[in-house]
Amino acid sequence: MPIQFTLRTLLVVFILAASALWVGGVVCLVTVLYLTLLTLFLRETIRQKFPVASGFLLIMGLVLPAALILSSFEPSQQSRRRLACAGKMRQLAIALQEYESQWGSFPPVCVKDSEGRPMYSWRVLLLPWLGETTLYNAYRCDEPWDSTYNKKVAAKTPDCFRCYPYRNAKPGMTDYVAVTGPGTMWEEGCECRVKDITDGMSNTVALVEMADSQIPWNAPFDLPLEDALDTDPKSVKTIRSYHLGNTDGPPQPVGHAALVDGTVFFVPGRLAPENFKALVTIAGGEIVDIQNLDALILPEPSPTIPGLWTKLTGVLILIVSFVYLVFRPLPEKWTRSREEADTAETADALPEDNTM
C-alpha cells in the first residue's frame, strides 16, 4: 500500500526541495531527497530489526547533507577563485620572463606605428607564450587594436587575461594591467631588461589586478602611475577585485600583484603612495616588505555577511524540514496496513490447530 501524504507534508517536501536547491544546487537537491526518501520508507523496518543501524542512518542523513551544503558556501568558492587568479598572474609573469629571455627585453607597454600612434598592447605580443598562438596568428598587427577586424578577433577574452567571468563583467576586457610611467618597467618608449631592474626582480611589481578595468585586453591602455597614486577613496583607478565575495557591487580596493620573478601576493587595500611607488619602480633602491603591507584605505565591510546569514537560514530550513519528514507520524492507513501484514505473518507462523 503506498504512503499517503497530507497537504502539509507535501508543503514540507516542497520547502525541503526548494531550500536544498537554493543552498547547494542540483547535487544537494538530489542527495537530500534521496536520503529523505530512504530514511522515510525504511524507517519502521530498520527501527524494528536494526535499531542501531537505524540511528546511524538517521544521523548520516543529517550529517551528509550538512557537509554537502557547507562545501558549497561562497567563501570556499572565493578561495578557489583567488587561487585561480593568482595562478593566472603567475603565468603572465613567467611569460614575461620567457619573452625577455628570447628577445633581450620585456615587451614594450604598447606597439606604435611609424607615425607614433599606439596600435596594440603588450598583451598581444605575449600571446605565443601563453598558449594562444592561434589567436596571435589571427590577429592583424598591422591594424590598430580597434579596427573592425581586430575587434572581432578580440571579442572573446583569452582566459589568461580574466580572473573570473563575473556576472557584470563585459566581454573583451582584461583584469590584469601594467602600471606605467617614469621609473617603472613599463615606461613608455623604453624596453626594460632584467639588468635594468636594480631593485631586484623579487622587489618589483610587474602586473596588478584591476577588475572591471574597462580596458580591452588588446588595447594599448593600462594603469598610469599618477592615477594609481591618487589617494581619493572614490577613485577606481587602482588595484581592485571581487575577492571579498561581493560580485554584485563594485570591486573592492584589494587584489593580487605579481612580481617580476613570478611571485604573486595579495594587496590588502589601497597602499600609501610611497609604498606603491616603491613597489612598481625598478631602480629606486627601496625595499618593501610585501608580507607586512599597511593599507592606506581599507576595503568597505563586505556586504556578503547578510548573504552568508541567508545561506545559514536556508540550511536551517533544510534541516528542520528534513527532520520533520523523517520523524513525522506515518500515515494511519499505511501504518494499519503494516500492522495487518504483521498479524498475517504471525498467524502463518503459528502451528495449525488439528483439534476436531
Image (cartoon, rainbow, N blue to C red):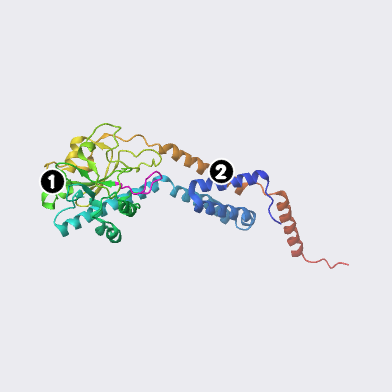
**Quadrant of res 238:** top left
Q: Which residues are magenta?
A: 164-175
The residue that mark 2 highlights is 320
Q: Quick one: 44 or 173, which is closer to the camera?
A: 173
Q: Quick one: 188 or 40, which is closer to the camera?
A: 188
- The amino acid sitting under disc 2 is Val
Using the rendered image of the protein, determine whether residue 127 is visible from the camera's viewpoint: yes
Residue 116 drawn at (x, y percent): 17, 47
Asked which secondary structure carries label 2, the reply is: helix
Asked which secondary structure carries label 1, the reply is: loop
The image shows residue 174, relative to residue 102, as above or below, that is above
The residue that mark 1 highlights is 199
Give the Cα separation between the discs numbered 2 and 1. Answer: 60 Å
Residue 25 drawn at (x, y percent): 49, 50
Residue at 78 percent of width and 66 percent of height: 351
Q: Residue furthest right?
A: 356
